[in-house]
Image (cartoon, rainbow, N blue to C red):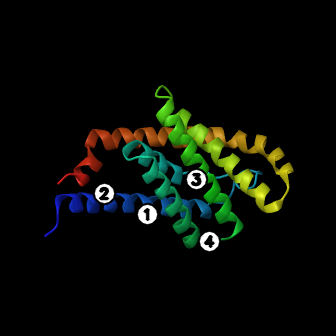
Amino acid sequence: MYSVSKIVSTKRLAVIAMLVAQAAVLHYLESLIPNPVPVPGVKLGLANIITLIALVIFDFRTALEIAIMRTILGSLLAGTLFGMGFFMSFSGAVTSTVVMALILRSFNMLSMVGISILGAIAHNVGQLIMATLVLHFPGIFFYLPAMLLFSIPTGILTGLLTNELVKYIRATNRVQTLLDD
């Protein structure tokens, strides 16, 4: 016989698996979009929407697990697992998740857009730290202003999308319905 706690944890795991799958697909699809700007590596950060949703709905640990799993699965789908792109993406995802969680818990007045912008900036800083460690060239941080120029509008976009999705999830009670017995 199954206990209620096992059923709840199984339902929770199913919701998390759906979020990981959505984030991995967004990660992969984004890798297929040609870069429209002359700055290498600029992406919209659509998979970050799922991480932000997980931070709001669940907790830091769950959001971090989702960010890590989506980076691994998305890179596996894109054929870049354990390549330089994977390590850049991984370091950015972990750094941004940590920063967004700290901001979300510490500054209740900051909007989802503000949290997303700071997450995008943290993602870029995490990537540059990884690049510095791999390339042994700290001068790569001169690239930061160009990255920041694009992280602000992409952070705004993902923040706005996340805000609308969180409103929808809360209004429809979708996740709670899935988690309830």
Q: Name the residue at 41% across, 46% down.
A: 59
Disc 4/disc 2 C-alpha distance (Å): 27 Å
Name which residue type carries label 4. Leu
Residue 59 - label: none
What separation in Å lies between label 4 and label 1 (alpha carbons)?
A: 16 Å
- Element under disc 3: helix
Mark seen at residue 12: 2
Q: Nearer the viewer, mark 3 or mark 1?
A: 3
Pointer 4: what residue? 81
Looking at the image, do the residues carrying marks 4 and 1 touch, with CB atoms under 8 Å apart? Answer: no
Residue at image mark 3: 94
Report helix, strand or loop for mark 4: loop
Residue in the foreground of this view, choosing between 163 and 115: 115
What crowding class fits label 4: few (fewer than 14 Cα within 10 Å), some (14-19), or many (20 or more)? some
Sequence-earlier tag: 4 or 2: 2
Foreground tag (4 vs 2)? 2
Q: Earlier in the sequence, mark 4 or mark 1?
A: 1
Q: Is there a contact, CB below 8 Å, between mark 1 and mark 2?
A: no
Of labels 4 and 3, earlier in sequence is 4
**What secondary structure is found at the residue carrying circle 1?**
helix
Above or below for 99 versus 19: above
Nearest-to-viewer mark from 4 and 3: 3
Label located before the other in sequence (3 or 1): 1
Residue sitting at 46 percent across and 47 percent down? 60
Which of marks 2 and 1 precedes in the sequence?
Answer: 2
**Which residue does the numbered mark 1 point to in the structure image?**
21
As rendered, which of 29 and 125 lies closer to the eye?
A: 125
Q: State whether residue 112 appears in this view.
A: no
Image location of residue 35, percent across then percent down:
69, 56
